[in-house]
Structure formats: C-alpha cells, structure tokens
Image (spheres, coloured by chain):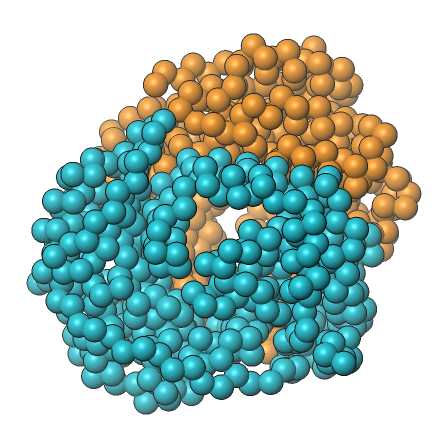
Chain colours: A orange, B cyan
Amino acid sequence: MTHSIQSFRLSSGLLVIVEPMQDVQSAAMTLLVPAGGVRDASGRCGTAAILTEMFPRGAAGKSARELCAAMDNLGLQRGVHVGSAHVTFSAATTADRLPDALPLISSMVTTPHLADEDFEPARDLVEQGLMSLEDEPRQRLGKVLRQYSYAAPWGNSSEGELSDLPSITIEDVRSHYRRFMRPDNAILGIAGNIDPDEIRAVTESVFGNWTSCSVPELAAGERPQSPCHIEHDSAQTHIGLAWNTVPYRDDRYYEAWAAVSLLSGGMSSRLFTEVREKRGLCYAISASLSTLREEGRVFAYAGTTTERAQETLDVTVAEILRLHEGITDEELQRCKARAKSSLIMQQESTTSRASSLARDMYHLGRVVTLDEINDRINRLTTSQVCDFAVEYAPKSMVLVTIGPQALNPACVTTLGS
Amino acid sequence: MTHSIQSFRLSSGLLVIVEPMQDVQSAAMTLLVPAGGVRDASGRCGTAAILTEMFPRGAAGKSARELCAAMDNLGLQRGVHVGSAHVTFSAATTADRLPDALPLISSMVTTPHLADEDFEPARDLVEQGLMSLEDEPRQRLGKVLRQYSYAAPWGNSSEGELSDLPSITIEDVRSHYRRFMRPDNAILGIAGNIDPDEIRAVTESVFGNWTSCSVPELAAGERPQSPCHIEHDSAQTHIGLAWNTVPYRDDRYYEAWAAVSLLSGGMSSRLFTEVREKRGLCYAISASLSTLREEGRVFAYAGTTTERAQETLDVTVAEILRLHEGITDEELQRCKARAKSSLIMQQESTTSRASSLARDMYHLGRVVTLDEINDRINRLTTSQVCDFAVEYAPKSMVLVTIGPQALNPACVTTLGS
C-alpha cells in the first residue's frame, strides 16, 4: 500500500493536494477558502455565515433545486461550513463519481448566484441558528469561551452575532464574496481511489479560471477579560476553562497533544477517572486542543449539577495544575496505543484524509504522512511530556460559566500570584 | 473482494457472526445483550442504565483502573451503551489486537464486580445525565416522543426516570444482571481484517462458559395519549411528530425507507426544501425511521422560534400528508444515489459493519449483504413508493412540543376524521 501524495498549483493559483488510496471505493474532497468569520467587518459579524448559507442556493445558471438535485444524483454527501479562518466545502461519494461532482462544487464556489431573494431566508436561518443556542448552553459556552480566549477577530463567533445581523446587507455579503472567496491561499485536498492525472485535468478545467485577488493581512484586536458568568435558569452549571498551549505548527505540538491526552484521552485519563468516575462530580468532562495557525489553546469543559459545580471547578483545576506529577511510562504508553488505533481508523476514511491534507497544508505548508505522525508519537518520552507540562502549566486561565449562579473563581484568579 | 460471512454458536449459546474484510487494517465488534431498559422492573426505570455504568468499574479481579488501562493499552476505542432492547458493548482497534481485547470485554460482560462501593457513583452519574436533559430540550423531546409512540415498556426511557432512581438498590442491579445478562439471544458481530478460525477459538475460550438462563417474554403495557406539551422558558419551540410505519423485518421496509428518504434524505428532500429552505421557517428539520423488532415509527423533529412554531407545525404536517403526491423518477433516483454512496462508505468502516451484522441477526435472523441492500434499493419503483405512501399515510400522529406555549394541534388531531 504505497500512497504517493501529489501536490500542484492550478493556473488560478489554487493549491491542490491529492492522495490516491487503492484499497477503498470512495473519494472525498475538502476545499478551504480563507473567507471565514475572521473576515467579517466590525459590526457585521455573521456576513460569512450568511454567505455560507447562500452558496447552495443556485450557481452557474442552475437554480437551488437543480443544483441540489444534480449533487444528490451523484450520491454526494456534502456540506458548506463557516469557521473562523475558512469557509469549508466538503464532499464525498463513490470514487468514480467524484470527477462529475467537482464541476458542481466549483460552480458554487466560483459562480454562486447570491440573488437578492435568497438573502432574507439565508439571514433568517443564521438568526435562528444563533437563537437556538439559547437552548444549547453547552454550545453557547464553547462560543463564549473562544471569545474570551483569542483576541478579536480570532475570538469572534463565525456563526455571527444576533445584534449585528440586522445591519448586514446583501451588498456586504457580495463584497465579502468578491474580496475573500479567492484561490489565493485556498487549498483543495482530495483523497480516495482516484487517478491523480484525471483529478489534475478536472480541477484545472473547473478551478483554473477562478479569478485571484490578493487579500490583506488581519490585525489583531482586543480580548475580553474573564471570568465571565452567564445567568441561565437551570439546575445545571456548565463550566469552560481555557489556557495557552502551542499551535499545530510548533515543534512541540506532539508533546502538547500527549499532555492533553493524559488529561482527557480515553477512559483511563486523569480528568475522566478523578473527576467523573471516582468522585462522581459531573456527567461530562473533557479537554481538547484548539489551534490557530499562530496560537493554540486547551479548552476544557465540565457539565454538572449546580450544587456540585464549585467542587467540580476546584477539583478540575487542581487536576490540570498537577498534570506534571507522576507521569508514568504506562500512562504515556496508553496514550500512544490509543493514538495509533485512531490513526489506523483515520487511514481508512477518505473524508478524514482529505480534510487532513488540506489542514496540514494550511498549518504547515506540507503534508504529514500517517507514518510520520506514528513516528513522532512513538518517540515521545515521559520526561519530554513532563517538561512540557511544567513549562506550559497554565499561568492564567480563562473561566466561563453558564448556570443559575457564578462560582468562586479563586482557583483560577490566584494562578498568576 | 469476496467477503464470506460466517456465523456459529458457542457452547454457551452465544451467536457469533464474523465478516472478514481483507482491505482494512482495523477490526470492530458489537455485542448485543437483551438486558436493556425494557427489562427494568416497574418503578425501577434506570436499573439497566446503572448496571451499564457499573460494567467498566472492575471485572475478573481487575480494578476499574486496571481494566481500563489494559483496554487503553490495546488502543481500544469502546463503549457500553444502554438501549431499549439491548445493552450494547462495542469496541474497535487494529485488527491484530482484537483477539487480545476480547478477553477484556468478556470479563466485563461475564464477571463484572458490581461492587457495593461502585453503586452510588454509578447511580449519581445516571441521575446527572437525566438532569442534564433539562438543558437539552431537543434530546428531552426525543425521550418523550418515544414514550408517547410505543406502549410500555418499549416506550420507556432506557436512560431511566429521575423519580425511580432513589428506589433502585444494588440488589436490583445485581438481579437485573443475573436474569438478563445471558448468552441466550445475545449476538456478537465482528468485522475486520481478522481470521475467522482464530476468532472462533478466542470467542469460544472467553464466552463459551458464559452461563445461560432463559428469559421470560415481555408483556406490552400502556401508552400515554398525545398531544403533549412541556413548558420550557425559551424563545425556541421544539416540535416532535411520530406516526406508524413498518419495522425493519417487514418486506416493505425498503419502501418505508424510500418514503422517509423523500421527506428527509439529503438537501433536496421535501421537508428540507419546503420548510427550511423556501420558507425559512426553522433551522433544523428532519425525519427518520425508528424500528423495534415488531413495530416501526417515523420520528420527525423541527426546531424553530416560538413565533414561527405554529406555521412550522402546520406546514410540516401538510408536507408529510401529501408525500404520495407527485413522486417522480428523478426524485426517487436521487434517494437511490444517496443510499448507494452511503453503502460504499459504510462498507469501508469496520465499526458500522460489525454493528450491522449484530443488528441484522437480531431483527431478521440473518445477515443482509451490502449487495442485497443495493439490489433491493435498485429495484424500488415510484409506483411502489407511492402506493406505500398512500397505504401508510399517517392515520394518527403523536405530537410533543417543548417551549413557552402549547400549539394548536388541529392539524394532527383531525387526522382520523
């Protein structure tokens, strides 16, 4: 099973990375276009989200219904998603049908109608999605935690802000499209049982004329100061914590990965056993890495009853702070074993491979093979991970809570002192 | 790629189905044991849920921590889940490690500790999980919709009832274990790059002595009458609908599948285009099949703002009622294309194959190959699907809503008249 990954640039400048996989019947693609929420103008947070909602509503002379029917006819599982950095187009189907799907995806990307009459329904849906967060405090917490963790615009909500939506016009959306939906710095990853030469010809024919236009750098803004409490009438309290770590492109990323994995990878991880299993403090607890290109954070979540919320917060923070204590070879070994079986599973999914190809190019400018990841993980030692845990122990923490009452934040606010 | 599926019975009576897949590196297993929530005694709803929470807490002389560490060492991705009919043990890892994982899974199943001191923490977590539904109205709606759709005990919540939890004792849990966690009617499905002879030897050695014990039939009880409204202070209203269809084992199941697929499969489906895209009435809408062995339902969901809730309900019900109108070859063709690409993707996942093997044996007493499903789908005609839609048009509908105010249920309550 030799997978030779190829990458090439189309005439338009779009970077394409292709990984042929002989042992599968499917094929998948991920297109990252740097037109995400960070590009929303000030006071217009939600522009990229409305644009994203408008892409499937007709392109290249095909009505929304025709476009949708054509894609369904190819059995195309697909989505358009707005994130901070990117608007992401993803699709998967049987390998033989991907070449027919690419022109349809490309028409949405390069010649969407963005018609007047589709604007209101799209904005309404974005508005409704935001309002629905009211009934989903856990998701809402994630949104607010991000805002308190990264400086604007990186902390902005890519799903938009309710207060900004009424000011956004169809012209804002079209201008966002014209300025940012460009092949410069966009990346297309394709994985599956495909012929790279055929993919090269098809992508050139459908994305080769996409007009380029250079995009200005982003300036970093402000970040609100935590702790933040959001009043919510319920018997539950949702707790979010965040602290600094290294981003994906950093040499020490795998150490950061191992550190979070010790905390929250699998059922023998520390947070799961100490906070959930032993003390029964909460029903849900987890920590995971978040990475921008230049910055990284660990985000942790605990959901609990209000009466146990204070203890849950205190115990969780204490567990995080003593992460460097007593890391054993066995403990690290378990993390490695878990990672390897995940890698094998991932290797078998064209969708996750396509998305990794594009993601790696964005963060690193090159593709990391599964063998390389395996090797990096194998070489990790307990002393490396312990050193990392000491060096990157949280010097301050962002704390966001949603529930009937605020918690005593002492365990977090006294960190620097 | 020839997959020859084998099935055999172990000395204990446990039925095992194995599907070798040469083109993958992983392997997965699903064990269904008919000890789910339907077996909870009256007034003790949650017994199976607590038992499920106790399985990972030590078995065969290994403490919770040792057991967990041993499984993590094998990179085992795993879960124990309580459903209505079954407690399900699922696991996946690299194919070479599955034989080492089976003894660990088997120890949880056949010789769990069920220690006194683990009971309270397990019950606490079940309680917290139920309380957390308060902050998740969409999940809560699913639970209530099921209760109004199937007669007890099939409509019972397998996650338990808050009011019953205080009465449940460790003896109830042990008794539930002794009576229902038996190999009779349990089914083990295994798929992946494995040697069937080796799997046969390993499963016989670890599950061959599992003591059998016949389990009594279940009697059907009552079903509450809808419409049901649950008051919830929010700007959102969550709407659930349910109506009768055929179960998976029925000859006409694929027609039922196509009918629901026209309503809610993919973005060109009727509910998505008519209710969400065209009218912008709601941010989330979907319909899906639910199947017991002897009965089936369609469950539909719409999440919307309270001011649009009445119109959303009326439009959704109208769309459902006119399903038989104007079904075209093109429309059905799109459903078929979607289904085929899903099948291909599924074929590449050992986890979903293992689960399908076990599920098929439970519902049908035989395994349906992907080729057979493909063939059944290919042969569907518009007139078959249309006839089905007429014959199984809802004669009554269950309606459950969660939100600040009840809706006018006329569109549902006048159905029979």
Query: In which quadrant of the rendered view does residue A91 lie?
Result: top right
Foreground residue among A165 and B311: B311
What quarter of the picture does the C terminus of chain B occupy?
bottom right
Q: Residue at x 49, y 68 (%)?
A: B295
Q: Position of residue B237 (x, y in %)?
A: 69, 71
Q: Position of residue A227 (x, y in %)?
A: 54, 63
Q: Residue at x 40, y 70 (%)?
A: B84
Q: Residue at x 44, y 75 (%)?
A: B154
Is residue B167 something one can see in this rendering? yes
Task: Classify A261 as above or below B108.
Answer: above
Q: Residue at x 91, y 43 (%)?
A: A116
Q: Is residue B386 left or right of residue B181?
A: right
Q: Position of residue A11 (x, y in %)?
A: 70, 10
Foreground residue among B171 and A387: B171
Pick out the residue farthest to the right. Answer: A116
Foreground residue among B165 and B221: B221
Query: In which quadrant of the rendered view does residue A101 lie?
Result: top right
Q: Position of residue A172 (x, y in %)?
A: 85, 41
